[in-house]
Image: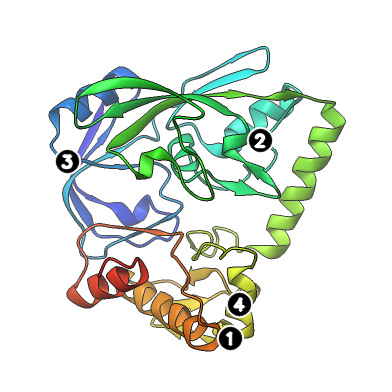
Amino acid sequence: MKVFEDYELKKHTTFKIGGKARKVWFPENVEEFCELLKTIKSPIVLGNCSNVLVSSQGVDSDVIITTSMKNFTLEKNIITAECGVKAPMLAKIAQEASLSGFEFMIFPGSVGGVVYMNASAHNQFVSDTCVEADVFDLESGKVLTLNAQQMNFSYRHSVLQEKKYVLLKAKFAMKIAEKSAVDALVERNINFRKNKQPSLAQPNAGSVFKNPENDSAGRLLEKAGAKAFSQGDACVWHDHANFIVNKGSASSKDVSNLMYKMYNVVKEKYRIELTPEIEYIGTPEKDEKEIWDTMLKRK
C-alpha cells in the first residue's frame, strides 16, 4: 500500500485547508486496513475529507485515508461496499441497476463518512437502506458485525460516534424501482444541488451546521444576516448562508472564527445554539480549541 511522510492534507480535503500529517497510509482493502488499525496507536481515519476542517497546524498523529478501498458487490438488490467507495459511485451503481435509495448521494463523500453521520438529503437517509456494517473495534482489536438496530442511527448520528468503532464495509438493501423514476429523482437532486449549493470549484465542506429540530440552519443564518460575514479568505456563500467557501488561502482559524460569528449571531437573535456538522481534525491553536469547545459544549 502507499505510505507518505509529511503529507500535506489540504490537497486531499474539499475545503483545500489543512497542514501536514507525519505519516499517511492508503490501504487498498479491508485486510490491509485492519492490519493498520491493529498496529497504529490512535490513528486518525479519514475518507474523502468532504465534511471536515483539518487544522492548518497539521495533525500530530498517523493518518489512514481510505479512498483506495474501492471494492463493492451487487447481488440482486443488495449492495455491499467498502468504506472508501465514493457516494456518487454508489448512487450510479444503484441507478444503473434500477434500485432506489441512493438518489440523494450525489455529494462528495465516501461510504465511511456517510454511514458515520447517517447522511441524508431530500427525505432519504443512509439509515433507510443500511442493514449491516462490519466495524473494527479499536478497544478490543476485533471485527464486529452490527445490524441496523445496533448502528443506533438518528439525525446526523450513528454508533460510530459513540464508540471506538471504525467502519470497514456496509451492506445496503435497496428498493427495486422503475429506472425512469430513479433517473428522474437523481436528475432533480442534481439540479437542486447545482442551484442551491456551491460546487467544489469554490472549496467548501458542505453544510456548516446541523439543522435544529423543526427548523433550518440556513434560514436562521440568513435571517440573522450571516451572508455578509467573512473572515480572512473564508466567507459565507452568497446563495446559502449555511455554507462557507475558501476564496483561496483561508486557514482553519479563519473558518473557525467565521463559524463562531455565525454561531453567536443565531444564538443572540434566536436563542438557538447551532451544532457544527463539520468535524474538526488535528491540532488546533488555543483560541480555535476554545471556539470548538464552546460550539460542541465541551466545557
How packed mark 1 is, by other alpha carbons closer than 10 Å (few <14, some 14-19, many 20 or more), is some
Q: Which residue type does callout 4 highlight?
A: Leu
- State which quadrant residue 184 falls in: top right
Q: In what quadrant of the picture does the N terminus appear?
A: top left
Find disc 2 in the rendering and name its residue. 102
Find disc 4 in the rendering and name its residue. 220
Q: Which residue type does callout 2 highlight?
A: Phe
Q: Quick one: label 3 or label 4, which is nearer the N terminus? A: 3
Q: Residue at x 26, y 65 (%)?
A: 56
Residue 233 seen in render: no
Q: Secondary structure at mark 4?
A: helix
Q: Residue at x 24, y 60 (%)?
A: 19
Find disc 1 in the rendering and name its residue. 224
Q: Quick one: label 2 or label 3, which is nearer the N terminus? A: 3
- Tell me whether circle 4 and circle 1 mark residues in contact (CB < 8 Å): yes
Give the label, 3 or 4, closer to the camera: 4
Q: Nearer the viewer, residue 148 or 118?
A: 148
Residues at marks 2 and 1, CA–CA distance in whole angstroms = 34 Å
Residue 212 seen in render: yes
The picture places residue 125, in percent across and down from the top left corner, at 62, 42
Left/right placement of residue 257 relative to residue 264 reads left
Q: Secondary structure at mark 2?
A: loop
Find disc 3 in the rendering and name its residue. 42
Q: Quick one: label 2 or label 4, which is nearer the N terminus? A: 2
How packed mark 3 is, by other alpha carbons closer than 10 Å (few <14, some 14-19, many 20 or more), is few
